[in-house]
Amino acid sequence: MEKDYTLSRRFFLKASGALMALAAIPSTVKAYYHEVKDFLIPPKQTLPQTLTINKKAYKLTADTRATLLDVLREELNLTGTKKGCDHGQCGACTVHVDGQRVLSCLTLTAMLPGKKVTTIEGLAEGEKLHPMQEAFIECDGFQCGYCTPGQIMSAVACVNEGHTNSVTEIKEFMSGNLCRCGAYNGIVEAIQKVAK
Amino acid sequence: MRPFDFTKVTTVKDGITKKNDVSQFIAGGTNLLDLMKKNIAQPETLLDITGLSTTIKTQKTGIQIGAMVRNSALTLDKEILANYPLVAKAVLAGASPQIRNMASTGGNLLQRTRCVYFYDTELPCNKRNSGSGCSALNGNNRMSAIVGWSEDCVAVHPSDLCVALTALDATVRVTDKNQTETVIPFKDFHRLPGTTPDKDNNLPSNAIITAIEIPVNPFNKHYAYLKLRDRDSYAFALVSVAAALNIENNRIVDARIASGGVAHKPWRWLDAENFLKGKEATTANFQEAARIAAEQTKPLEHNAFKVPMLKGAIEVALQNCLTA
């Protein structure tokens, strides 16, 4: 017991001595730490950019790695656009860029300057819902609602593209949007309703 | 994702000058960003080439499609729909409308395999980590190749567009690091795995694809693209078939049969094509062509089902050519 105590006291003295020595050269250690860190973890790069989203200009400095989806949700609080798979397999993050439906999870904001982004928040005019939003409510085009913003953005584009000539055609051109609740019949009905 | 520098390039020359072994061009990004998120691709610089080669040009010898033309544009172009409709058919069989709006023509050629082991960084894969071994060879190889594979790699090329392009004898226009323009025949563009499956294709290092060219051809009347997959839409092919016939007085003057989902590269069934030349367009001849193709396959443990699937798909695709 006595021996243990002596040992640990010796260790304490040694350790604190070493720490004191380190504290005496803080700038050198810090520089060395950063050198090692930069070697192991490459420093992040940022880009100042102006994004036009729902007719509004947003100025921000974003990481070059930032996807439109993450910037919408984490930086701009436009959380209507949903993150499903984050790998382009589910369609939950569908938005429009220059009027074309695209996946925001596979879009870098660095590639967007000069382009116009429309999200689900940009569809309604004030309190007046977009006809597709109305139709989704009327036709029961959702259950849990998680895929719905993506479904609606895709559905609006599907109508604009004119791919609504049959149920088969609608299903084919809506295949990029998955709905795990299985509200597909309601979704197809809503699209048919708006297409009329 | 590894941090990277981002630069927009203004001309092909600018892009080529800035390209090196640690930088990568980004076009549609639908495959590259996915790979970067999984740390499979780790470029130090991304060179945005979306401003380059964005037009479709009709030429005397054929059509020239700029490498940056989006996939969806191929399905709407009047010249393509009139004279190269197989291309539009194949594109529409692939991906989803959102992805087709983003993905580029050149990028389509360069997309990496969707082999599950390539994506699983915990397991060996010669394509991802050369020399580490092929997990699919004796693993779950249901989606893997049935022809042209090697012990080192059994992955398949995932493209639909490329199946149509190889059927139509397209060429790939490339500018290399020395700013020299070369034209690579489509059949020589993609590679078989051999012992170097980490190389998907024969694009010279740090070169850029500027355009895809399709020669004038007589295959705009009798053509079909048939894709068989686990669900009706938005899935990669188990087996796909691009078929095109040039028929005069019920005799087949020329035939093209290509497949996706079967090999490391878009695959041409040349012996089956040659068999059909000069023959009548009959079910019996189509069946024989399908048999010839199917006979050349060598399935793995879990994908023998692809062989009868391929045989049926070729026969049906050829039949569909008559009603297209």
Image (cartoon, coloured by chain):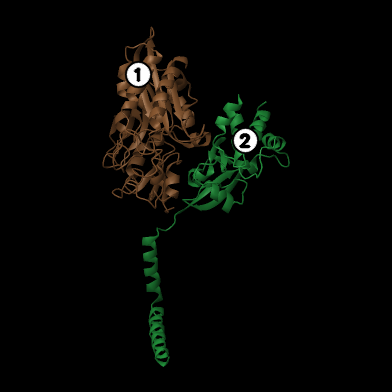
Chain colours: A green, B brown
B43 left or right of A86?
left
Q: Nearer the viewer, residue A118 or B75?
A: B75
Q: Which mark is residue A144?
A: none
- Chain assignment, label 2: A
Residue located 44% across and 24% down the image: B225
- The secondary element bearing badge 2 is classed as helix
Q: Residue at x 67, y 30 (%)?
A: A194
Query: Residue B87 appears in which quarter of the rendering?
Result: top left
Q: Which residue is mark 1?
A: B288
Which amino acid lies under the numbered mark 1 shown in the image of this protein? Glu
Q: Which residue is mark 2?
A: A184
Comparing A76 with B284, the one in front is B284
Q: Residues within 10 Å of mark 2 (few under 14, many from 20)?
A: some
Foreground pick, A82 / B153: B153
**Residue at mark 1: chain:** B
* Labels 1 and 2 in the same subunit: no
Would residue B101 appear left or right of B197 to someone viewing this image? right
Residue B293 position in % (x across, y down):
33, 25
What is the distance, in whole Å, between disc 1 and disc 2 at their CAs? Answer: 42 Å
Where B165 falls versus A109 (above or below)? above
Q: Residue most toward the top?
A: B249
Name which quarter of the figure residue A37 lies in: bottom left
What element does badge 1 sit on?
Answer: helix
Which quadrant: the C terminus of chain A? top right
Of all residues shown, which one is farthest toward the bottom? A2
Q: Is residue B118 above or below residue B228?
A: below
Residue A89, position as x, y percentages in the image:
51, 41
Is any part of residue B66 visible from this angle?
no
Where residue A53 sits in the image (x, y, percent)?
Answer: 59, 44
